[in-house]
Image (spheres, rainbow, N blue to C red):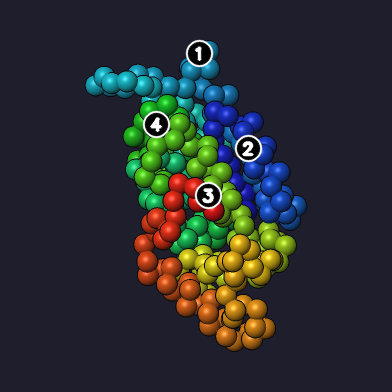
Amino acid sequence: MKIDIFTLFPEWFGWLSSQRHVANVLATGSTIECVDFRRDTPLTAGQVDDTPFGGGAGMVLRVDVLEASLRARYGVDPVQLRERRRVVALAPGGRLLDEQLVGELAAEPELTLLCGRYEGFDERILEHFASDVVSIGRYVLSGGELAAMVICDAVLRKLPGALGDERSAAEESFSDALEGNPEYPHYTRPAEHRGWRVPEVLLSGHHERIASWRRERSRERGASPPGPREGADSGDTG
């Protein structure tokens, strides 16, 4: 997979590339390249944004700046670029990222991520250059860089060679193996701590019973909306 990230802060992504599962995928030939769209701006002094028509606070990333950056990178009209690769603009009002969308993106050979900043994109960027507008949640970040890292992390860990044990991705939250439910609880040593015991079935060595218990706990988590844990209080940091 080839991922291009258009951002004003390309240096931020060095940390992402150093993560083990990402480094594993990059070692197999996949790439993550960052493009500073300030570099190809047609405006003076590296300007990339302007005040919004109609007034209001903040600045908006200009459509001509993004066009110039995309043209310089790919050598085609950005309107046609969507026919060649998935172009994802990151914005709070987009399609919510979920396991289905992550799977779609992981199947793409080439992916372009556009990181918003300030008050976001001129709407014409979303309408004419992006094939998708994606949000990682119904909240606002200062820019799209963290959202781009989330997408890269979720997508790249699905690729062959990313994880040390391929079974790690087989039964994880929202996977087909768990019928789209959250993952079951995990425990490790010690078997008892402060009177809190690990469920006996997990110590039984009976693999069929363990598998059945895990499936049931996964279904329970899928049926119950997340909320405050029973018995939790201000002193419970677990």
Residue indicated by mark 3? 237
Of circles 4 and 3, the one toward us is 3
Viewer-proximal residue, 55 or 193?
193
Of circles 1 and 3, the one toward us is 3
Q: Verify CB contact (< 8 Å) between mark 1 and mark 3.
A: no
The disc label shown at residue 13, or none: 2
Q: Is residue 164 above or below residue 132?
A: below
Mark nearer the N terminus (3 vs 2): 2
Badge 2 amino acid:
Phe
The disc label shown at residue 120, or none: 4
Q: Position of residue 169 (x, y in %)?
A: 61, 66
3D distance between C-alphas at marks 1 and 3? 51 Å
Q: Is residue 165 above or below residue 81?
A: below
3D distance between C-alphas at marks 3 and 2? 31 Å
160 vs 184, left or right, is right
In this figure, what is the number of numbered marks?
A: 4
Disc 4 residue crowd, few under 14, some 14–19, many 20+, Cα 10 Å: many
Of circles 3 and 2, the one toward us is 3
Q: Position of residue 48 (x, y in %)?
A: 47, 22
Q: Position of residue 140 (x, y in %)?
A: 40, 37
Of circles 1 and 2, the one toward us is 2
Badge 4 amino acid:
Gly
Q: Residue furthest front?
A: 195
Residue positioned 37% across, 50% down in the render: 95
Q: Secondary structure at mark 4?
A: loop
The disc label shown at residue 44, or none: 1
